[in-house]
Amino acid sequence: MEHPVTVENLTVAYHQKPVLREVEFSVPKGKLIGIVGPNGAGKSTLIKSILGLIPRASGEVQIFGKPYKQERRRIGYVPQRESVDWDFPTSALDVVLMGRYGHIGWFRRPSSKDKALAMSALEKVGMADYADRQISQLSGGQQQRVFLARALAQDAEIYFMDEPFVGVDAATEKAIIALLTELKHQGKTVLVVHHDLQTVTEYFDWVLLLNIRLIEFGPTEEVFTAENLQKTYGGRLSLLQESGNLSAFKA
Amino acid sequence: MESLWLILSDPNTRWVLAACVLLGLSSGVLGCFALLRKHSLLGDAFAHAALPGICIAFMLVGSKSITLFLIGAVVAGLLAAACIQAITRYSRIKEDTALGLVLSVFFGFGIVLLTKIQQSANGNQSGLDSFLFGKAASLVGTDVKVMMGVAAVLLFVCWLFFKEFKLLSFDPGFGRGLGLPMGLFNALLMLLIVLAVVIGLQAVGVVLMAAMLIIPALAARYWTERLDRMIVLAGLFGALSGAAGTLVSSLTYNMPTGPVIVLCATALFLLSLIVAPQRGLAVKGMRRIKLRSRIAEENLLQSLYDLAEKDLLAGRLRPGIGYRIAQLIERRPTAPKAALRTLRRLHRDGLVKRVGAAQGLETRWMLTDKGGELAYELTLHQRMWEIFNMYEGVLGSFKWDGRQGGLAEQLPPEVLQEVDRLLDAHELKPRLTFAGGGRA
């Protein structure tokens, strides 16, 4: 079987201290995968190092069996919303168009076809009415949707998303999850950094439990067990459970 | 006007004018990217670092040549950029400190070299000290021709790589993810900024050049929400400052051109700061005053509602019952005069009416039906919000966005239902309804 993403022996270190140690896994095609673990477990670092945004101390990443650099176009990335300055003088449509830059090539301006694609990506996330809006005037959830639309416009086969549900309203969270499910049905592979344990079984087919090293990776029903969570979160889990009971009401 | 014409007929002045327009144009355009990349101070570091480069170029050749000065300044500027990057990467020193460090060390070294040159045999004719504060009058035709060439290249490259520079300024990480060589574009942009700084040095000087990079771009940001327009505007503002500065200083005896150019740019910035639509202080101030009076109005409506509701619950509510200003102030403290002003506004809008004034009693106020409906909605919203905040841990995290309508429109239906139940449980549901409005 062809694996969209294969990670071998990945280690990342900041100032000598390892933040990811010997992580190895192969991602199956057409799955919605949650990357779950405590704060400081290296969830974002895992994504960023796979994408080459931060240097790896060691390790190989293969995309569809080929080196990452050759297949970069097939990967879409949705960074954390806070990673950019939203007071940038540009419109929502313009940000989505940036997703086309890899296809457009140097010097050239976006064509009307690129604009149509960007517009349809905005429609898919329910933001078509906001195309001309300056991005600082959008709410947090809307900004997240714009980022998602930008990744859609990229027309990739594998998507990496860094905490797309942070600071968004319930409606946006539902819209995002519906969209990710649709991507999955189109045969695309989606990896999402996620920290809300309660929604894991509802949202994801597969789970990657991470705490510096890879704890477990597999189908949610097999892997997302109390025992594995104990291994991932250690003593911190009891605390989470308590707050989990409190918020049991949440739909 | 006549004296202006006279001045412009002097070919030297025309060269100076052309040079100052060019330097304003190119620093304005490149300044946009520096500003948006949060690299405003980098221009300052480049400008100061250029001085030793210029001095060394002079010492090597022994004569003044703008092309050589350019090369020296660019090399020194790039060396400074490399130093800043190396310091931030290999030590614990942060970028702002590294900038300050490199800037002062390079500048100090430049001053040492400058002093050395001036003490030497051909030092007096060198005129290198004009690079410190700028001396536009020292510009000659050949200098300006070189400047024109450099400025043309700068603008062309910016136009060519507009899309890439935009991505670099907004989200370089995403650009790298797309497989675009962001490091290369970054280096190119740095080189362009160094060039823009260097061509302005002779006219504006090492000390003030950073201002020309920042101020026109900052002023332009106030007028538009589009990068392409911002760049065009910043270029215009820069060019305009250059032209105005040259003319003002040549009309006035013994006025230095460079500083006047910077002052002209500053005047444009101050104008933008105050009168720009959307972002200008004047508009913002107006908006704040409007908001304040709207809050005062809403507070009074809610106070009237609270008082009436209390009477309703106590079985005292009669038709036509009104409340004194003192009672309203007691509920939500404001100055009596301000309260009266607000009541008059509400009265004008038909939201409240006076009762009792005819009988010679102290004026009392009550809600009209229209005002009552509004007060009901406001009170309901406020109490829902209180409940939501009380039970936020249970109801789940949610960020209310006031620009997208009320709480009731934005909360998911099941949460809204729960809020409604909790309102009842806490006896906070607004009880008083008005004709035609309010959902009891």
Image: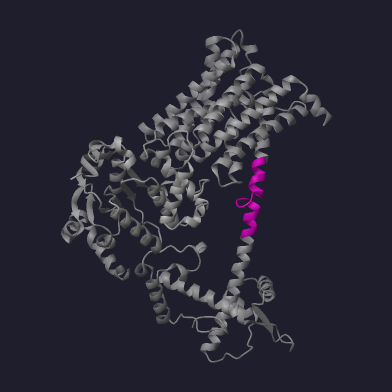
Whether the magenta-drawn stretch holds residue B271 is answered as: yes
Residue A15, relative to residue B346: is it above or below? above
Q: Main secondary structure of the magenta part?
A: helix
Q: Tag count in the figure?
A: 0
Q: Is residue A120 left or right of residue B1?
A: left
Measured along the vertical axis of the image, is residue B309 above or below residue B81? below
Magenta segment: does it hold A64? no
Quadrant (top left, top right, bottom left, bottom right) of the N terminus of chain B: top right
At 51% from the left edge and 54% from the top edge, which residue is drawn? A137
- The magenta stretch is B268-287
Residue B397 versus residue A99 in the image, above or below:
below
Instruction: Please state the horizontal and vertical placement of residue B116, each as a whole percent of the image.
Output: 56, 14
Answer with left or right where residue B235 lies relative to residue A55: right
Q: Residue at 67%, 81% (x, y): give it.
A: B353
Q: To which quarter of the image does residue B250 belong?
A: top right
Q: Quadrant of residue B397?
A: bottom left
- Coordinates of residue B274 in the picture (x, y in percent): 66, 49
Q: Is residue B203 visible?
A: yes
The reply to whether residue B333 is visible in this rendering is: no
Specify the quadrant of the image occupied by residue A195.
bottom left
Depth check: A119 or B313 in front? A119
Does residue A1 appear to the left or right of B427 in the view shown? left
